[in-house]
Image: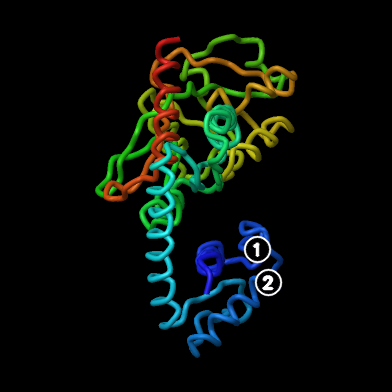
């Protein structure tokens, strides 16, 4: 049995997809299926079962044990590689990072490029998800690091602050507010809005700030990711409040008008999170350090 087979098994359990597990491990779907069959034949136990009528892949009782111990083996193997590489001062390996769309698509790419130039032997494996799942995957050890907006201190999680984002209003170029450079929260009263879904931290913060100024808005639509919100605003659904880095391109291209908000409240903190008791790999430590350094540079600028 190879370590790579254990990795395929764990990835299949975590991703709930034969195609994604195959893609992550650079093999075919049939190769993934064959490796699972080989494991089940070797141990003479059914490890996985498909839920009829759904895409869910469920662990059997034997599969639960095998998954848990496989994770231990993979962690030990990763530490072994880490220790051997550190003997020659080499930073290498894979850092699994889960992040929310707005940060992952618009803020992390230049930092990842900078990191890859410094440490070409390290691969940053980025996954995009909602905040609740990012936190869950960090706590479960599915990913080593998470990058989220409005990171909340909680037991078992360490938070390293990154550069904060300014929240801005976006609207179509022909909207009445498009001619304004800066507006107050009061000017948003009774406007139609495209909002993040209620459980997303940026939505919670936006609702809280608007309430503090006694402002209510009309909900035109709710979506769970920044790209859909931007497209909805473009076609005239309403206004939206979003982090500025996510709309730099649309502002430059004239697709959307960006209007600044006068109040100082409109800041979105961003942070990298990891499990407190987990010893980060050297590569992950270097990446966290770079993410934090970018925050310091942003403040200095």
Residue 100 seen: yes
The residue beneath circle 2 is 31
- CA gap, disc 1 and disc 2: 8 Å
State the colouring used for the structure image: rainbow
Mark 2: few, some, or many residues within 10 Å (few <14, many ≥20)?
some
Q: Position of residue 251 (x, y in %)?
A: 68, 19
Indicate which disc, 1 or 2, sits on the residue closer to the N terminus: 1
Residue at image location 74% in from the left, 23% down from the top = 255
Residue furthest out toward the left? 155
Location of mark 1 (residue): 22
Give the secondary structure at mark 2. helix
For the point 68% across and 36% down, which residue is it? 232
107 relative to 157, above or below: above
* Percent of width and height locating residue 9: 53, 69
Could you tell whether 39 is left or right of 68 in the image? right
In the image, what residue occupies the spot 45% across and 16% down?
298
């Amino acid at each position: 049995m190879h370590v790579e087979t254990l990795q395929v098994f764990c990835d299949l359990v975590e991703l709930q997809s034969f195609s994604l597990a195959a893609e992550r491990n650079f093999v075919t779907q049939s190769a993934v299926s064959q490796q699972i069959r080989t494991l089940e034949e070797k141990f003479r136990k059914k490890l996985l079962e498909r839920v009829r009528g759904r895409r869910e892949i469920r662990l059997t009782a034997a599969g639960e044990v095998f998954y848990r111990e496989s994770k231990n083996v993979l962690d030990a193997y990763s530490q072994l590689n880490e220790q051997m590489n550190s003997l020659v001062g080499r930073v290498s390996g894979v850092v699994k990072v889960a992040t929310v769309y707005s940060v992952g698509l618009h803020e992390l790419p230049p930092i990842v490029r900078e990191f890859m130039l410094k440490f070409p032997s390290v691969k940053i494996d980025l996954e995009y998800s909602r905040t609740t799942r990012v936190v869950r995957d960090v706590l479960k050890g599915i990913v080593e690091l998470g990058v989220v907006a409005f990171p909340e201190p909680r037991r078992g999680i360490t938070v390293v602050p990154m550069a904060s984002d300014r929240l801005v209003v976006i609207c179509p170029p022909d909207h009445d507010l498009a001619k304004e450079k800066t507006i107050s929260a009061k000017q948003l009263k009774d406007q139609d809005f495209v909002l993040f879904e209620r459980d997303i931290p940026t939505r919670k913060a936006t609702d809280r700030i608007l309430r503090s100024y006694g402002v209510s808005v009309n909900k035109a639509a709710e979506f769970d990711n920044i790209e859909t919100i931007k497209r909805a605003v473009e076609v005239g659904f309403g206004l939206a409040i979003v982090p500025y880095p996510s709309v730099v391109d649309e502002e430059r291209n004239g697709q959307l008008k960006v209007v600044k908000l006068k109040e100082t409240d409109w800041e979105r903190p961003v942070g990298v999170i990891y499990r407190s008791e987990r010893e980060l790999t050297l590569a992950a430590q270097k990446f966290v350090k770079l993410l934090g350094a970018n925050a310091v540079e942003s403040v200095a600028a």
